[in-house]
Image (spheres, coloured by chain):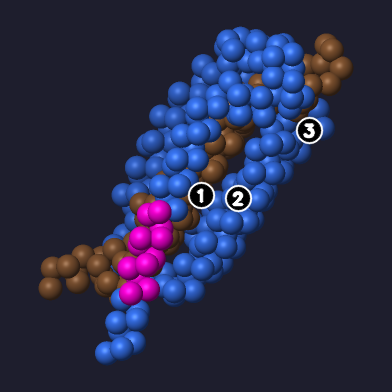
Amino acid sequence: MILPGLINYWVVVFLMMSGFYVVMSTGNLVKKMVGLTLFQTSVFIFYITMGKVAGGTAPILAAPGTSYSNPLPHVLILTAIVVGIATTAVGMALIIRIKEAYGTIEDDEIQAAEQS
Amino acid sequence: MLEMTDLVDLALLLFLAVLAITIAKQRNLFVVVIVMGFYSLVSAALFTVLDAVDVAFTEAAVGAGISTVIMLATLLMVGTEEKTPSQPRILPLLAVVVTGAFLVFGTLDMPHYGDPQAPIHQHVAPRYIEVSGDEIGVPNIVTSVLASYRGYDTLGETVVIFTAGVAVLMLMGQALRFRQRDGDA
């Protein structure tokens, strides 16, 4: 296998970095959360890519001698997905609370409101 | 040697890259959230290609479903337009390019995609694959590891979800009280 080699990892790095860029470049809190989710999902793809075995199949027991992909990253990422949605929910609740208190979700406007 | 699934894998990755750029460029938050849901769905398809079927349906249900619903519900309360940024965005771009370059450098000595000799496949995974059928009696190895070998991890996960649920209820309860007080005034 020549072509896929490391390309998967490089695309994942690109995806991670676009999430990172969204987090840094915007002042809007909802879009920051979307950027974090983007980063997070890219990390999931990274782990699952590492667990893939060429010629393997999904890790559900079949006939003896079948080759399986590594089940361990799958377990870790299942946990991470569920924890991710929990943190997203808390973040969104905080954003709603900030909107109630300051009337805006742009971080520079929140800072201006703090100083006045 | 390039197999059909590798082509699907590369096509889906390319699709994800396009969606990520769309999210970064788009200013309307409604569109951003919907494209993010689509990104989750495409990544679920990619997980299926990479043999992670359990992860795929969790991502499709939780990432593309519940997450999108939560974000849309938030948008309902906070509005959907992002303010145009006043400061130039050269610095974040520079930071991202430098970090990305380091990460790519870090991947250079990683085992190649699908390599059965990679260190990750040599440690505990062979044991799970060989004996979990006899020890746990569940054909799905991911379920065996999640619910039995690493059951305490999963218990910790449910504690995290419980804590998050309590936190959301406390925050939202306060927000609703504010709204009622404003209504009375």
Q: Residue at x 39, y 42 (%)?
A: B96
Q: Which of marks 2 and 3 is nearer the N terminus?
A: 3
Q: Name the residue under label 1.
A: A85
Residue sticking out furthest to the bottom: B185
Residue flagged by tag 2: what amino acid is it?
A: Val
| In the rendered image, residues at marks 2 and 3 fall on the same chain | yes
Percent across and percent down for residue A10 are: 55, 33
Q: Give the range drawn in magenta.
A: B166-177
Which of A52/B76 is in front? Answer: B76
Residue flagged by tag 1: what amino acid is it?
A: Ile
Which of A53/A90 is in front? Answer: A90
State left or right for residue B25 relative to residue A48. left
Q: Mark 2 points at which residue?
A: B62
Q: Which residue is drawn at 69% across and 36% down?
A: B54
Q: What color does chain B have in the rendering?
A: blue
State left or right for residue B145 relative to residue B138. left
Percent across and percent down for residue B57 are: 69, 44
Percent across and percent down for residue B37 are: 60, 56
State left or right for residue B185 relative to residue A90. left
Magenta: main secondary structure equals helix
Which of B57/B131 is in front? Answer: B131
Q: Which residue is drawn at 50% across and 24% down?
A: B107
Q: Which of marks 3 and 1 is in front?
A: 1
